[in-house]
Amino acid sequence: MTNNNGTINQHCDVIVVGAGMAGLYLLHKLRSAGYSAIALETGDDVGGTWYWNRYPGARCDIESLDYSYSFDPDLEKEWQWSERYATQPEILRYLQFVADRYDLRRDIRFSTLVKQANWDEGAAQWNVTTATGDTFTGQYYVMATGCLSLPKEPDVPGVERFSGATYFTNAWPHEGVDFTGKRVAVIGTGSSGIQCIPLIAEQASQITVFQRTANYAAPANNGPVRAEHQQKLQADRDAYREAARGSRAGVPLPRGEEPFFTVEPEERERRLEAGFALGDLLTISSSFSDLVTNPEANNAVQEFFRNKVRAKISDPQTAEDLCAKDFPLFTKRLCLETNYFETFNLPHSKLVNLRRTPIKSITETGIDSTEESMEFDAIVFATGFDAMTGAIVAVDIRGCDGVELKDVWAEGPKSYLGLNVHGFPNFFTITGPGSPSVLSNMAVSIEQHVNWITTTLNHLRKEGLQTIEATYAAQEGWVTHVNDYADLTLYPVANSWYMGANVPGKPRVFLPYIGGVDTYRQVCNDVVEQDYLGFELSGSSGSHCNDGVVRFVKPDVQMVLDLIASLEQAPLESLPLEKARQQMEANTANRAPGPEVGEISDGTLPGPFCDLDYRLYRPTTEGPHSVVVYFHGGGWVLGHASSDDPFCRYLCVESNVLVISVNYRHAPEAPFPAAVDDAYAAVNWIAINAESLGGKSGSLAVAGWSAGGNLATVVCQMSQKQGGPKISGQLLVAPVTDCDFSTTSFSDNAEGYGLTRNLMQWFWNNYCAVSERNDPRASPLRAESLAGLPPAMVITAELDPLRDEGNAYAAAMQAAGVSVKHIQAPGQIHTSLTAVDTVNSANGVRKAMSDAVRIFSNYH
Ligand SMILES: Cc1cc2nc3c(=O)[nH]c(=O)nc-3n(C[C@H](O)[C@H](O)[C@H](O)COP(=O)(O)OP(=O)(O)OC[C@H]3O[C@@H](n4cnc5c(N)ncnc54)[C@H](O)[C@@H]3O)c2cc1C
């Protein structure tokens, strides 16, 4: 409909912004599902990225065979790529071909910039306004605006003063540029700079490249489409595409299984050389499991890349300047290059290292650096994008109660799955922040999002529902999960656009999801299967919501659980005792060792029935040290003085204390109260002999994990009752404090998180007759009074059957006036709290533990 003032007003089911790869497929999919939809696009044709970025040398860096749509086998058969990495004109032709083939242009409004989008709660629809005042209303609003579509303003002083020609790689003139005989400056050496510099150098009489940060780059080794790839695809199209969807990065490559340093040096070198020669982004990173998590491994491969540069460049200083050194490899997108480094061997090329020689200003005729004035005919800016969030918040988007998305995202984007934002019903982002997006083959990620959104709209339609909106809890949970994953990697240390670090003032937050395309797809499917977990769905007949957090186990904890599951071991409680002990022993043998301590010595001390083994961990610092008597875990049945070795080392080093891990008699051979008697005797003996062991007299704390936590606090109760040695503090890590199996944590966490209800039952049955379990020396929570106990640090794990009894014990001690610090660690399991150097997401709580022990050692 045309208004009186000539503006347009149109209604449809779905308003889409953007007609790039995402907008095109979405339009097709929506139409096929029977929705009316319109796409609004600033450009005057389709293509998005491939419409705007027409600079010389612009190409994809994921092989074209993979970087293309897979939704229609006929389309795939009709289009043949001429090269392994197609150029921009060919990719644009492909997207134009798609638009024509599915007759999409009739529902796209070109040369239309969307300025504003408001959610009208009463009408349950979005009102969208363009720069020319046209308005569109729709039940759903989808931003298919691209992750790399809003150019970043160049932050070089004097840009406006230059009287020569200026070009931006991301808004290149359609008619092309002839640099023949021109003196050209290029500012920026990211992917676009690296692609265009060699081709500009072929024409220019002089090329000067201004580089702030050198980037890692591998040779593209472009050529015809790889025959083996083509054959694989043609042999079984579905299997090929499915392998891509089920891969880490959306390209059919297996995930690296082996840590770098576990591979023999010659084999490591062979894999690096082969990956490098192959010329692609992902082979090297997929050759090992830990290149983005282990700094040493990353360093080794960085050096491999730097040596390749050094071998290519004749001038040693230029070579060093071109070597990336400021950030870990892969934490910025690896670039693929063709003749890039060789360009700097040409007599008419020059590299200006802005770290050494910054630009003072752009002038009327060129660029003044701190060292010289240079004259140019043209300046090319390859200065990148305000990535992932820029194009979204460039539109004034207002959700419920007029709240502006820009404000909600002021400290970094918050989104559920990178698809929807709490407070913004019926609003979707394609490849939004918090989804794999730019860390993946975007063609695969775009298709997955479009399919998910369409499936969701179909569901709403089928159920007679009008709106869908992420809940606050689900969104917070997802944001935490995205950050947890990033924090396990080296990505957050780089000043990359993944971190928003290229745009002044942009919050420093890791924007995409690093868990992988495969993992992420599973998450999205799980959400649907669990009745749209974390979404509120509403219609005229009311609303319903299965609220919750879709991934609450910490990512590294999940990896450990997956590894354990892959071993397919029989449950411990199903094994004969000796076999159970052997299995536990075998499992602990492969752990990370924990930090180096000053000295480890083994000894025995007299117990009430027999000598007890102990292992002593001494710090490197000069003694005497405060003493911590430590009791190992293992359900009173398994384990020994060195079975919690990494954790004991950790406490020794981090708290600077002498840790003495004492063995005690085990059940069922020596049932309750044997372990208690031994533990109490050990503390008494150590208190008396502290000095001769190199400890401080009168400064003794106790600590224990699991059943060891039970013994540690039982010892405190006994010592207090019987006038035993003074104990300065108790560290109780996931302790057993009661024999009650009816708690919520025992039902919620009965299985699937390492320690199971059945196993715990087996431990108790071995340890203690049912008639004796009410004894506070077995169930310390049942003590008559907890008053006067030493200060305590109690750590419980959210996903532990023992969680509630640990929490109850902390609360009971607090109620009795004991000084208690208590942390319930979210997303952790019974065994992860002490998994030093394996479960890094527990580093924070571990630090709290070691701090507490340090503080205990000051109370004496
Ligand atoms: C040089 C370059 C090379 C790349 N190479 C690869 C590669 O090899 N592999 C890969 O996976 N990815 C690559 N990418 C990422 C690439 O952006 C995606 O692969 C993909 O093209 C994104 O498609 P899209 O439709 O989501 O977004 P885009 O292609 O960015 O399209 C978004 C569209 O939305 C329009 N738009 C934005 N805001 C508004 C508004 N307010 N109003 C109206 N219209 C608006 C824009 O004009 C644009 O046309 C590359 C990116 C660049 C810049």
Image (cartoon, rainbow, N blue to C red):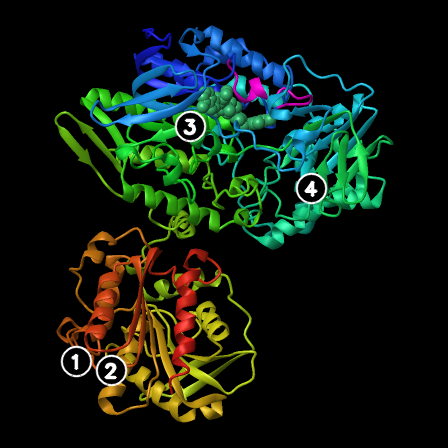
State whether label 3 is within 8 Å of ligand 1. Answer: yes
Amino acid type of the residue that numbered disc 4 sits on in the rendered structure: Ala
Would you name the residue on which mark 2 appears? Answer: 717
Ranked by sequence position, the earlier of labels 4 and 2 is 4
Disc 4, disc 2: CB below 8 Å?
no
Q: Position of residue 334 (x, y in %)?
A: 62, 37
Q: Nearer the viewer, residue 55 or 64?
A: 55
Is label 2 within 8 A of ligand 1 (CB to nearest ligand atom)?
A: no
Discs 4/1, front: 4
Between marks 2 and 3, how big is the CA–CA gap? Answer: 63 Å
Q: Which residue is mark 4?
A: 214
Q: Secondary structure at mark 4?
A: loop
How far apart are the two marked residues, 3 and 1, measured between alpha carbons?
62 Å
Q: Nearer the viewer, mark 4 or mark 2?
A: 4
Mark positioned earlier in the residue sequence (3 or 4): 4
Task: Tell me the magenta residue range.
Answer: 46-59
**Quadrant position of the N terminus in the picture:** top left
- Residue type at mark 1 is Ser
Q: Earlier in the sequence, mark 3 or mark 1?
A: 3
20 within the magenta span: no
Ligand 1 lies under 8 Å from the Cβ of mark 4? no
**CA distance separating discs 4 and 1:** 66 Å
